[in-house]
Image: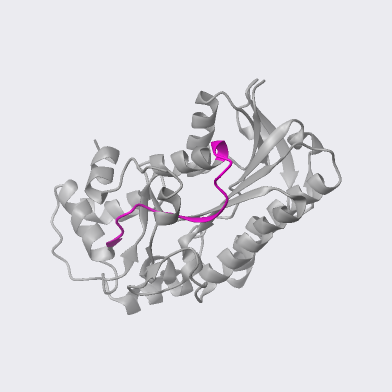
Amino acid sequence: MQKRILLTDGTGLIGKHLVNTLRQQDYVIYQLLRDPAKTESSVYIKNFKWDVKKGQIDPECIHGVSAIIHLAGEPIAGKRWTHRQKMEIVSSRTESIRLVYELLNKTTHQVDTVISASAVGYYGNRGDELLTEDKPPGRGFLADTCIEWEKAVDEAQDLKMRVVKLRTGIVLSKDGGALPQLAKPIRTGLGAALGSGRQWMPWIHLNDVIQAYTYALNNENVSGTFNLSAPAPVTNKEFTETLAELLHKKIWLPNLPEFSLKLILGEMSETILDSNRTACQKLTDTGFKFQFSDLRQAISNIYA
């Protein structure tokens, strides 16, 4: 019998690619969407309506489901961080999974696993410190968001479920995320390192992100919190220079000053100025193998 997986919104960059991979592995995918009619469905991909703000969810979404993958959340860098936007960023991650748990609490079900996104923003701005999963959280809005996010996800433990949280770095893909935004000024000859350029960037190829989710799904021995970033993080300066070289461009402008970025982006500047030198050994110790461990190799593959 085909296994059924519930995704809390599979329409983002990671979600779309994950759905395709899960289908190739013969899973039936259920998706929770605000407007199911806007997303194509089939015998193997079924869409269910939910409205987190109204506390509404279609109870059929968990019928026969064995695992939940929690990807729902307002984009971190989608809009300027007003007070209202910050509240939406947090609540869209926490209240969404709690709504699913409420349904599980009052319904007979077969769910035994919850795999959730999180982010390396959990650690805050930590300079050159090597960040393993047992390090304490940092300060700032990103860190506070991740703390609340993971706390909400962990409520599955009260339901006696296996919980996996993937603290994900900067996902590299030509289909979306940070890479097209970083490549755009470089292509026009206006690229430059950001701030000091010394801040660490914990990057990861999208293919490895998808592989990590399916790996966690298919391996019951994988449980707990894991950093999901490539084994070789680089500084912003190194990233910028490598990207420029592979795009056959030169970096001739000085670094974009930190104060300018803070003036333009406000508090949201921490998404590009915070330094996160994350370690991924805990994940690789379980047997996971990265396809792309070198930045040059990863970018070359993306723009091949």
Q: How many numbered marks are there?
A: 0
Q: Looking at the picture, tell me which residue is in the foreground, 203 or 34.
A: 203
Q: Where is residue 296 in the image (x, y as percent from the top left)?
A: 22, 48
Q: Looking at the picture, tell me which residue is in the foreground, 148 or 96.
A: 148
| Magenta span of residues | 217-234
Q: Looking at the picture, tell me which residue is in the foreground, 243 or 79.
A: 243
Which corner quadrant holds the C terminus? top left
- Image quadrant in which you'd find residue 98: bottom right
Q: Taking 167 as reference, is 162 left or right?
A: right
Q: Position of residue 297 (x, y in %)?
A: 24, 44
Instruction: Tell me what residue is drawn at x 69 percent, y 35 percent.
Output: 66
- Asked if the magenta segment contains residue 223, the reply would be yes
Q: Position of residue 146 (x, y in %)?
A: 56, 64
- Image quadrant in which you'd find residue 87: bottom right
Q: Position of residue 162 (x, y in %)?
A: 65, 48
- Asked if the magenta segment contains residue 196, the reply would be no
Instruction: Tell me what residue is drawn at x 65 percent, y 28 percent.
Output: 3
